[in-house]
Image (tube, rainbow, N blue to C red):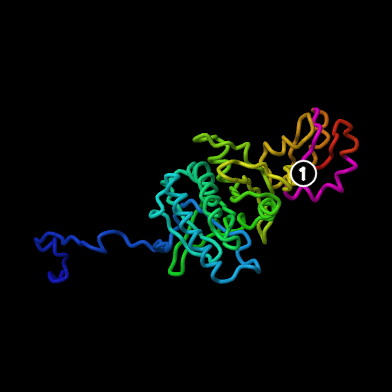
Amino acid sequence: MNPSLEPRNRAGRTARRFHGRYAHPISHQPLPQPVANLPTHRSIVVVDVVSFTRPDRDNVDQLAIRAALYATLRDAFEDSGIPWRQTVREDRGDGVLIFVSADVSKVLLLGKMPARLGELLERGNAQRAPRQRFRLRVAVHAGEVHHDAHGYAGYDVNLAFRLVDAKPLREAMTAGEAVVGLIVSQSVHDGVLRHGYGGLDAAAFQRVRVQVKSVDVVGWIQLVAGGAVLPVAAIPTADEVPADVLPADAIAATAPDGPVAVLLADEASLLDDLAGLGVRTVVLVGGAAGLAPGLAPLARRSTSIEHEFIE
């Protein structure tokens, strides 16, 4: 055997150890790609001036309103325990988009802040010329927010703007004398408001249906004047909110007495069995709602069902 071809360990030398990228077996699996612009969780507040561009207001009036708006918001946040300097704000001409850190409790946004905002608005309006007096619609939501070179974006930001533009909120402000109209998203209601943290009163909010562009959700409205909660008038009641956008407890509240069953499309064959168990109301949800005409004859044989379908 040619000695020059023998492995080095056979020639009395220790085999060389390899380091670096060749030290481990090479994997042919694709390397994970870095994810750019990850979202962060924020409380989202959208503030909009009611009738900002009405015909009797000129540029001087609008500029005065904008200056008063920012000063009033700053004082209301500070007085409610929310440091204004720690918020992130984007101007919207006739309003403001405000992001609050997740470290700040939403209880402050729903409890102290709206009442204080109402007090400051009324005090300021008493000293302003009639054309420069203003009222506010306010939406409070929370969710994931992206930030890029142009500003902030994301589904939850869009939803907050849809809430503040809700027809029931606009109509409630038009029908009454409230200086602040507050609307809260379903997720904030379920996570904060309904638990009564910090003395929050969920019963002071009215459930409404929000239909703006592609959004069809539930919101919760409260009207404020001079720090006092006003009754909400001339807005849709719970019965006018469709079942597919109501929480389960709302469906039960609007249904007649007796057991209620909720059926999906592939459960329609259970209709007679449910009737035998004493079910008095059948609610068809999702794709099952479209089966109502075909199931109607079957439902009539079950005399214990008073209301056959709620879509």
Q: Secondary structure at mark 1?
A: strand
Residue at the image position 48 percent from the left and 54 percent from the top: 73
The image shows residue 49, relative to residue 122, as above or below, that is below
Camera-side residue: 302 or 118? 118
Considering the whole magenta stretch, tell me its main secondary structure.
helix
Camera-side residue: 266 or 210? 210
Q: Relative to 125, is 85 on the left or the right?
A: left
Residue at the far left: name it: 12
Q: Relative to 132, is 297 on the left or the right?
A: right
In the rendered image, which residue does mark 1 sit on?
A: 284
Q: Position of residue 244 (x, y in %)?
A: 71, 47
Q: Is residue 29 visible?
A: no
Q: Relative to 256, is 145 on the left or the right?
A: left
The image shows residue 58, relative to residue 294, as above or below, that is below
Q: Position of residue 237 (x, y in %)?
A: 73, 44
Q: Which residues are magenta?
A: 278-298
Residue at the image position 79 percent from the left and 33 percent from the top: 256
Q: Position of residue 291 (x, y in %)?
A: 81, 48
- Residue kind at label 1, given as amino acid type: Leu
Q: Is residue 177 visible?
A: yes
Q: Position of residue 274 (x, y in %)?
A: 79, 32
Q: Relative to 149, is 118 on the left or the right?
A: right
Marks counted in the figure total: 1
